[in-house]
């Protein structure tokens, strides 16, 4: 079986990608420092502990498995933290990623699928967001991803690197078969926070109810983690078959309001979400959603989880089954 090195493969999205790779006939080799990942999420291939900034360790692992492609999920991704501690994001997301790219060069591996973000767009002027939209990130996290997208372009021109960058907003949901969970510390994602609030009857913060949206709450694009994983696997075949390097939005093309999200959580958990209303947060846009048409056309990607009630149910089922 062909090896794929999944950097950050013990994390939330990376572990789901590993399961999708295994189903597609690949052997995922997880490379993770376990700062945020969980070794018990490594189930479909070997595990190698290491940091992306450790050149010697990367060379050792790449020489051992000779993967045909690298998937890169190993990034810090908390927007607020990136503002208060930008050094953490510059060191890992930028420096670490360049170390990974250079290790790939040294070991003759020239294909990478990079987990980017729609945060590279910043304050958008028109919706839905398309790949050609101006990129002007408003926080260090988004900027760190944009820098690596530029590095991929430059390495492609100079060294022949073949690459795909996946941009998405709100990864959501969980493996419907229950093999994988979502365990961030601290948790920042809306759906697990809301599910846990409903289960424990603790308050969930809603920031802003006076947006220019149908129900006054902010609207975001939620994409199921299994659909994200599927797109990453499809990107390997796309590049292998001669597809042109580039960026793809992974999105539903529609938005879900905070109120609609909480209604879905209440339905899935079977109890209401206690709500604490608060003022808007600085920098929060009223509406954000993107077009996934390019991925559908060029990757043959067809998201299976487009209903917010179904997305939320896959998360709620796991949290209910793993209450402790």
Image (spheres, rainbow, N blue to C red):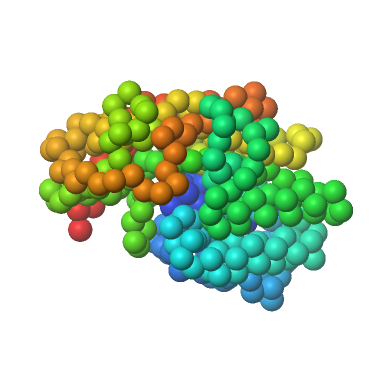
Q: Residue at x 66, y 67 (%)?
A: 95
Residue sitting farthest toward the right: 158
- Residue 137 relative to residue 171: left or right: right
Report whether 223 appears left or right of 206.
right
Looking at the image, which is closer to me, 252 or 142? 142
Q: Residue furthest bottom?
A: 56
Q: Is residue 139 shown above or below 214? A: below
Q: Residue at x 27, y 43 (%)?
A: 206
In this rendering, the answer to whether 58 lies above or below 285 is below
Q: Residue at x 47, y 49 (%)?
A: 13
* Residue 178 visible in the shown view: no
**Image point 75% across, 64% down: which residue?**
102
Q: Nearer the viewer, residue 295 or 132?
A: 132
Quarter of the picture holding the C terminus: bottom left
Residue 220, given in percent of the width and then of the height, sits at 41, 35
Q: Position of residue 180 (x, y in %)?
A: 37, 50
Residue 38 in view here? yes
- Rendering coords of residue 160 (x, y %): 84, 50
Q: How many marks?
A: 0
Q: Report the side of 256 relative to 268 (left or right).
A: right
* Quarter assignment of residue 131: top right
**Measured from the top left, where is residue 309 in percent x and y?**
30, 29
**Displayed quadrant of residue 147:** bottom right
The residue closer to the viewer here, 123 or 320, is: 123
Reply above or below: 170 against 107. above
User: Picture quarter containing residue 244?
Assistant: top right
């Amino acid at each position: 079986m062909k090896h794929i090195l999944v950097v950050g493969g013990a994390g939330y999205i990376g572990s789901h990608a590993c399961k999708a790779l295994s189903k597609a006939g690949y052997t995922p080799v997880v490379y993770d420092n376990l700062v945020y990942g969980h070794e018990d999420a490594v189930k479909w291939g070997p595990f190698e502990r290491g940091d992306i900034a450790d050149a010697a360790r990367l060379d050792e692992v790449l020489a051992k498995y000779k993967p045909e492609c690298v998937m890169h999920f190993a990034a810090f991704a908390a927007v607020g933290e990136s503002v208060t501690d930008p050094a953490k994001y510059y060191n890992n997301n930028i420096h670490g990623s360049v170390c990974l790219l250079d290790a790939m060069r040294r070991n003759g591996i020239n294909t990478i699928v990079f987990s980017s973000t729609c945060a590279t767009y910043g304050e958008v002027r028109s919706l839905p967001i398309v790949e050609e939209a101006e990129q002007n990130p408003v926080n260090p996290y988004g900027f760190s991803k944009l820098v690596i997208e530029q590095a991929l372009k430059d390495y492609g021109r100079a060294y022949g690197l073949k690459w795909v960058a996946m941009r998405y907003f709100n990864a959501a949901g969980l493996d419907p078969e229950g093999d994988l969970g979502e365990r961030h510390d601290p948790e920042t994602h809306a759906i697990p926070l809301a599910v846990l609030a409903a289960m424990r009857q603790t308050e969930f913060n809603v920031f802003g109810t006076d947006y220019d949206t149908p129900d006054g709450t902010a609207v975001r694009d939620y994409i199921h983690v299994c659909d994200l994983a599927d797109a990453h696997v499809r990107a390997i075949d796309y590049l292998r078959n001669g597809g042109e390097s580039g960026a793809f939005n992974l999105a539903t093309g529609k938005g879900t309001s905070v109120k609609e999200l909480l209604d879905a959580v209440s339905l899935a958990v079977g109890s209401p979400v206690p709500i604490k209303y608060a003022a808007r947060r600085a920098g929060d846009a009223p509406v954000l959603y993107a077009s996934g048409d390019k991925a559908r056309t060029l990757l043959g990607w067809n998201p299976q989880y487009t209903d917010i009630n179904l997305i939320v149910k896959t998360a709620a089922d796991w949290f209910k089954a793993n209450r402790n």
